[in-house]
Image: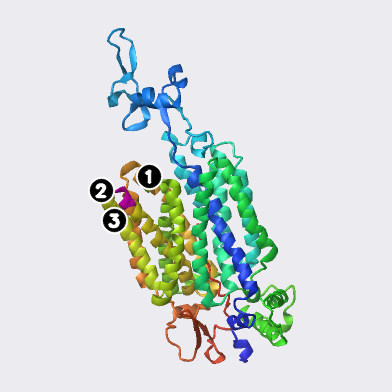
């Protein structure tokens, strides 16, 4: 095998300048796109926020009273003290006239009946929520959880449809379609006429954002060297948290939920337009599919942006990579603009679960990521179960992800992925479970601090999880493996909104106790996973199934404690030339 045949894609990127003008500007655009995802995804936190409502009798006396009069004089006296959704149907008679005294009800459960009418009054003329507009309270309260669950059902359906599409048709076409679809659905949500259409719009939003984070992060990683990827992983996760905090600020100013939909859609459209105009298809994907002409054109453009000379030597190396990384089934001379790469490939699902060791690791990762998603989204969308102000809690929860990601980067560089992953899960479990103690003491501030600390820890887990998974799952099945983990996590998040009812209906800290138990269980199971720090990315199934902790024939170059391991021709294994080396780190939200 010639030296050119054994050269890896990373060495080719190095010659084009690893982090030049091209990479920096495109990374900035992709970061803005990731920041915009929460704007459309989490709007239901505020659209479906809890409101003050009172059950009133359907009589002219009540309907003609002011909001303050109903609260202080009439409404409160007729309400059941245990449940605002009921009223007392019997009243004591007046001593003099013997007429019914509606200000003096008989406080007896036998006389408690469902409210005959609801009269909702707004403390502010500008405040308008979907909760009050569609009557999501009392017997309709479960529609709030159903709307949140439909969001994740939509994501699950989106994963079924698009799990492998990005590996087949390319990254950018899928991103453009789903980004435009997300904006269109968000705008359409502002005009839904009733609750049924609103719930359908939540499903549609979940469907449209299902693969955005995964493929945005994939495109970002595929243009960078390994020693830049960990830094950008932390930046992207921090950007996601900033997006949540930004949404909280926008929602605080714009209290009309329909106007909020239009504003966040307008904000999201800006980075989407920049991506369409300036972000090309992934060069690594083009090479992995043997699309030499397209890859050559893009490589020349990258070299021009980074002010690097695109030599004939680089062109020859690119052509060799297109042959080796696409499976080597075609000769160099066969590459043209219509080349679609190898025609026959073994199913990636069969490859993923055909190896017992790899399958067991993927299943453990799937469980851990499912737990992380359930806890992360449970705390994020369950602002009402955290003591304090909804806007403040949501903003703090998002902002705190920034220092969490900085901490995750430096600690993972020093200690490795596994220790950070396991530790953050266990600390999440301890903090969530401890809320049962502070709640028992009646310490609201303590519960709030523990909940936010749990959000920090689970954010660290979220930031590490998909990077860790991408370093365990080999390149040839990485997108499919990450999609499988994401799919399992979506099933968990579908159930998560209903777990919040445990706190609302049974015991206030019960949901956090459940989160704590699951997080600790996930941390203990993660102990069975291998350490990937300072290890080369596995390319083939064989790479992922063998111990790579020591290889004296490999050359390494390190930066920030993360090693780029370059295989030489003498190191190449039988699968190296036939395995795809996309090196595509995937990640997901949502």
Instruction: Pick the quarter of the image with the N terminus.
Output: bottom right
**What residue did someone put label 3 on?**
434
149 vs 13, left or right, is: left
Q: Which residues are magenta?
A: 440-447
For label 3, the crowd category at 10 Å Cα-Cα, with few meaning under 14, some 14 to 19 and many 20 or more, is some
**What residue did someone put label 2 on?**
440
176 vs 336, left or right, is: left
| Position of residue 516 measured from the top left corner of the image (x, y, whole percent) | 33, 57
The disc, 2 or 3, on the residue closer to the chain's N-terminal end is 3
25 vs 68, left or right, is: right
| Position of residue 416 measured from the top left corner of the image (x, y, whole percent) | 41, 75
Residue at 42%, 56% in the rendered image:
374
The secondary structure type at the circle numbered 3 is helix
For label 1, the crowd category at 10 Å Cα-Cα, with few meaning under 14, some 14 to 19 and many 20 or more, is some
The secondary structure type at the circle numbered 2 is helix
Q: Nearer the viewer, residue 499 or 345?
A: 499
Instruction: Residue lying at the far top in this picture: please name it.
Output: 97
**What residue did someone put label 1 on?**
501
The secondary structure type at the circle numbered 1 is helix
């Amino acid at each position: 095998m010639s030296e050119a045949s054994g050269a890896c894609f990373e060495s080719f990127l190095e010659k084009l300048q690893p982090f030049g003008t091209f990479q920096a500007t495109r990374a900035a655009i992709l970061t803005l796109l990731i920041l915009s995802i929460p704007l459309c995804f989490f709007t239901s936190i505020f659209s479906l926020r809890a409101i003050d409502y009172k059950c009133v009798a359907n009589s002219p006396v009540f309907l003609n009273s002011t909001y303050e009069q109903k609260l202080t004089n009439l409404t409160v006296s007729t309400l059941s003290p245990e449940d605002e959704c009921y009223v007392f149907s019997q009243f004591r008679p007046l001593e003099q006239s013997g007429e019914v005294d509606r200000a003096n009800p008989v406080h007896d459960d036998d006389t408690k009946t469902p409210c005959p009418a609801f009269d909702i009054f707004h403390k502010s003329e500008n405040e308008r929520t979907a909760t009050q507009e569609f009557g999501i309270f009392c017997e309709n309260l479960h529609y709030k959880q159903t709307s949140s669950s439909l969001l994740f059902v939509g994501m699950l359906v989106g994963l079924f449809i698009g799990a492998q599409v990005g590996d087949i048709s390319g990254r950018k076409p899928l991103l453009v379609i789903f980004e435009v679809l997300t904006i269109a659905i968000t705008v359409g949500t502002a005009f839904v006429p009733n609750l049924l259409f609103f719930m359908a719009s939540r499903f549609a939003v979940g469907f449209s954002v299902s693969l955005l984070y995964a493929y945005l992060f994939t495109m970002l990683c595929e243009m960078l060297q390994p020693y830049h990827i960990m830094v950008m992983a932390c930046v992207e996760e921090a950007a996601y948290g900033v997006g949540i905090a930004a949404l909280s600020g926008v929602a605080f100013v714009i209290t009309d939920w329909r106007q909020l939909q239009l504003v966040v859609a307008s904000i999201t459209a800006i980075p989407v337009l920049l991506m369409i105009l300036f972000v090309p298809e992934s060069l690594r994907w083009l090479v992995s599919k043997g699309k030499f002409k397209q890859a050559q054109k893009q490589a020349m453009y990258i070299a021009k942006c980074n002010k690097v000379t695109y030599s004939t030597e680089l062109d020859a190396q690119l052509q060799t990579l297109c042959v080796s990384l696409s499976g080597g089934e075609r000769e160099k001379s066969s590459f043209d603009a219509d080349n679609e790469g190898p025609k026959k490939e073994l199913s990636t699902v069969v490859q993923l679960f055909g190896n017992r060791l790899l399958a067991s690791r993927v299943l453990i990762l799937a469980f851990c990521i499912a737990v992380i998603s359930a806890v992360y989204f449970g705390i994020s969308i369950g602002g009402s179960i955290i003591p304090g102000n909804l806007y403040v809690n949501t903003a703090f929860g998002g902002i705190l992800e920034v220092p969490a990601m900085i901490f995750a980067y430096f600690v993972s560089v020093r200690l490795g992925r596994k220790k950070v992953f396991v530790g953050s899960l266990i600390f999440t479990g301890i903090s969530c479970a401890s809320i049962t103690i502070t709640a028992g003491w009646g310490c609201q501030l303590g519960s709030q601090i523990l909940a936010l600390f749990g959000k920090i820890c689970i954010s660290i887990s979220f930031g590490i999880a998909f990077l860790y998974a991408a370093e365990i799952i080999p390149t040839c099945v990485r997108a499919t493996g990450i999609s499988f983990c994401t799919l399992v996590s979506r099933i968990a998040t579908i159930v998560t909104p209903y777990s919040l009812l445990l706190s609302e209906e049974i015991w206030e800290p019960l949901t956090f106790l459940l989160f704590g138990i699951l997080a600790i269980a996930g941390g203990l199971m993660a102990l069975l996973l291998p350490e990937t720090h300072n290890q080369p990315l596995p390319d083939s199934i064989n790479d992922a199934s063998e111990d790579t902790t020591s290889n004296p024939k490999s050359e390494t170059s390190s930066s920030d404690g993360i090693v780029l391991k370059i295989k030489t021709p003498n190191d190449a294994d039988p699968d190296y030339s036939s395995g795809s080396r996309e090196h595509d780190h995937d990640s997901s939200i949502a």
